[in-house]
């Protein structure tokens, strides 16, 4: 892969709520097969950027291309894109009236053409992939812990074997061990399923453990680079984010792991 | 991952494998074994007879694409064959496909559910009746308990009037009383219209149109005014109580309140209950007037009974006791509606879904209890001869 293929390409994006401008002439690209972290302070529009790419919010100006199709103007391209991505919302966003297995089967059912036996089998495969026990399938989301709900949400996001996976704060609200497990899980899945991952996060551990490149939202634009590159930047927010006591600690602890990989 | 834009087709071949010695065969999945093809492949694989394929190995050399669905089909096939022929090897797979296969192969084979002995229909039916009966009993007991709790709290806060939440009370009076006036007024006006219209049509047959006024007076003052008002308030404010308190419960606001030493019954339930005790009689009074007004309009238009005549007939023939019978019920209905609304709200636990379920339940239960109470009042007044 000498010339990495671009899977998401956002150019000249402008987002405005009333008179407050969130993004101004923002460019953002994701290459096939990489894990892209998105960071930024509160209110810099990380989640908004994610929602714009997946079509939940329409930006004021700019183009968004996913898998080569213009998803803002071309409904067919949007539909193709929808079929090739999975989204994990913050708390899983599982349908509370369906069991976990039924939740995983919703996208499959929507797609149609699969027998119930095969869907049941596939639901079990997805559960095992995200590290949930098989007996979680017939349970309702309210019977699961927060961490398990996230895994179940991930299983549903993976239901159609997407090429592209969006994660909104995947480790928020998990304990450090649970968060580390989830990071490992995402990395493993990304490698074995060949996923491209876009991950909005605050969690420095996750950034170090999982991401290949990071896009930092500062001054309504994106600064992109690897952790090492961003650490050399002079912007005050980036400095305090990557050079705070916590950041040094994480970087110090995680360095050997990075080497190993 | 630079495969050509795959002509999304998938199939398989079974080839003799000379290298593996006599009887060695290769199962070769061909093309894109992905979710889109899974359904077809599933059917084709089901036709494959394991008995005819001894010593099979699965060769991934001709695969272009593999996802978890395809991998699962291969793993499942391998498991089926292993039952008859022992270990099935996966050979010649692309490294990325091999990793995926390994992960999918970790999925445990399906365990048959143990509850094979399904209970029969009759047992289930009886069990459901039993569970529902116990549910109703527990619910009734808890509601009476809640009534007691509310009364104790009320007594305590009467002793310490400074703890009483006046702002909350006034705000609730506005929300449950003032804001409900347009809908209550309009509906009872229309009820009056309908009643007068139907009554006049029937009574005209006997030449007794003038008794339409008596009909209106008794039915609206005694029953309809209060009942319609109570039902509207149960649907409007009782449901709001459940939804508000339920949402606070979901957000753990009620828990937070308790840790600060605030009593949820005192802070949340009492202002709502007292507000309804104040507003429901007032709304009923207003509803009575609007209902009589609606009836009066029809009397004037349809029966040529002038407003003056209408008032006189009403005053002469309708005893004031009918008015009091209606009004006396209002505070009791208010307590029922407020208690049920708050009680169901406090029963919310965990999910947002239960807020919706309990809100519906609270309205149904409040209306049900209001009508039961109304029937009880009728019997009581009958016995008292009012």
Image (cartoon, coloured by chain):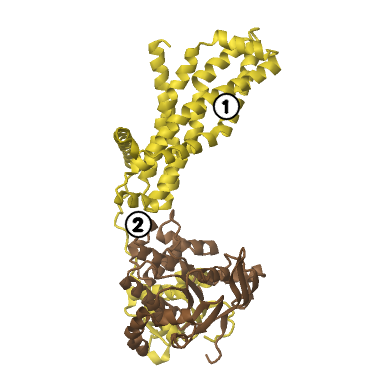
- Residue B356, how many percent across, how many down? 45, 46
Q: Mark 2 Cα within 10 Å, few/some/many (few <14, many 20+)?
A: some
Tally of marks: 2
Residue that numbered label 1 is attached to: B188
Residue that numbered label 2 is attached to: A143
Chain letter of the yellow region: B
Q: CA distance from mark 2 to mark 1?
A: 46 Å
- Residue A233, how many percent across, how many down? 48, 86
> The residue marked by circle 1 belongs to what chain?
B
Q: Mark 1 Cα within 10 Å, few/some/many (few <14, many 20+)?
A: many
Q: Are marks 2 and 1 in contact (CB under 8 Å)?
A: no
- Residue A207, how many percent across, how many down? 42, 79
Residue in front for this viewpoint, B219 or B18:
B219
Chain letter of the brown region: A
Is circle 2 on the same chain as circle 1?
A: no
Q: Residue at x 44, y 45 (%)?
A: B244
């Amino acid at each position: 892969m000498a010339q990495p293929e671009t899977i998401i390409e956002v150019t000249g994006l402008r987002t405005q709520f009333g008179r407050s401008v969130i993004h101004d002439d923002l460019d953002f690209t994701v290459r096939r097969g990489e894990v892209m972290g998105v960071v930024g302070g509160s209110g810099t529009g990380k989640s908004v950027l994610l929602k714009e790419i997946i079509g939940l919010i329409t930006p004021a100006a700019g183009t968004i291309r996913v898998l080569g199709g213009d998803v803002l103007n071309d409904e067919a391209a949007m539909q193709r894109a929808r079929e090739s991505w999975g989204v994990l919302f913050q708390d899983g966003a599982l349908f509370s009236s369906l069991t976990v297995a039924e939740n995983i089967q919703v996208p499959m059912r929507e797609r149609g053409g699969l027998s119930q036996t095969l869907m049941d089998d596939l639901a079990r495969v997805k559960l095992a992939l995200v590290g949930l026990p098989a007996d979680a399938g017939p349970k309702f989301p309210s019977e699961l812990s927060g961490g398990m709900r996230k895994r179940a949400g991930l299983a549903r996001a993976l239901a159609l074997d997407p090429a592209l996976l969006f994660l909104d704060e995947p480790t928020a609200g998990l304990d450090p061990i649970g968060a580390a497990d989830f990071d490992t899980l995402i990395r493993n899945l990304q490698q074995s399923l060949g996923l491209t991952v876009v991950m909005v996060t605050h969690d420095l551990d996750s950034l170090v453990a999982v991401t290949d490149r990071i896009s930092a939202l500062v001054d309504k634009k994106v600064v992109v680079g690897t952790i090492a590159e961003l650490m050399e930047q002079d912007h005050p927010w980036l400095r305090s984010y990557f050079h705070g006591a916590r950041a040094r600690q994480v970087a110090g602890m995680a360095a050997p792991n990075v080497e190993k990989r | 991952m630079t495969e050509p834009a795959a002509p999304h087709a998938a199939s398989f071949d079974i080839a003799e494998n000379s290298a593996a010695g006599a009887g060695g065969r290769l199962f070769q999945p061909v093309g894109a074994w992905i979710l889109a093809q899974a359904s077809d492949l599933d059917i084709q694989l089901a036709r494959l007879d394991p008995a005819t394929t001894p010593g099979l190995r699965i060769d991934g050399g001709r695969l272009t694409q593999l996802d978890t669905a395809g991998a699962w089909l291969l793993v499942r096939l391998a498991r089926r064959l292993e039952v008859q022929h022992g270990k099935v090897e996966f050979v010649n797979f692309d490294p990325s496909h091999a990793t995926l296969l390994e992960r999918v192969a970790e999925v445990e084979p399906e365990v048959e559910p143990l509850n094979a002995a399904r209970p029969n229909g009759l047992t289930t039916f009886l069990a459901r009746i039993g569970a529902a009966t116990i549910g109703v009993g527990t619910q009734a007991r808890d509601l009476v308990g809640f009534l007691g709790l509310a009364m104790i709290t009320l007594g305590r806060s009467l002793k310490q009037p400074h703890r009483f939440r006046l702002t909350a009370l006034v705000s609730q009076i506005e929300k449950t009383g003032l804001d409900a006036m347009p809908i209550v007024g309009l509906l009872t006006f229309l009820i009056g219209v309908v009643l007068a219209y139907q009554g006049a049509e029937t009574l005209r047959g006997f030449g007794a149109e003038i008794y339409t006024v008596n009909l209106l007076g008794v039915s609206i003052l005694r029953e309809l005014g209060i009942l319609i008002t109570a039902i509207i308030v149960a649907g409007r404010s009782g449901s709001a109580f459940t939804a508000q308190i339920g949402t606070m419960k979901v957000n753990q606001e009620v828990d937070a309140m308790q840790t600060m030493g605030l009593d949820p019954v005192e802070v949340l339930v009492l202002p709502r209950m007292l507000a309804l005790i104040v507003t429901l009689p007032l709304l009923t009074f207003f509803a009575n007037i609007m209902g009589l007004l609606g009836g009066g309009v029809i009397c004037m238009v349809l029966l040529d009974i002038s407003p003056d005549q209408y008032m006189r007939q009403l005053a002469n023939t309708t005893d004031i006791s009918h008015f009091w019978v209606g009004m006396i019920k209002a505070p009791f209905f208010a307590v029922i509606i407020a208690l049920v609304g708050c009680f169901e709200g406090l029963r919310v636990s965990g999910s947002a879904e239960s807020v919706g379920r309990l809100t519906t339940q609270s309205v149904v239960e409040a209306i049900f209890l209001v009508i039961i109470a109304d029937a009880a009042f009728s019997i009581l007044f009958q016995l008292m001869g009012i």
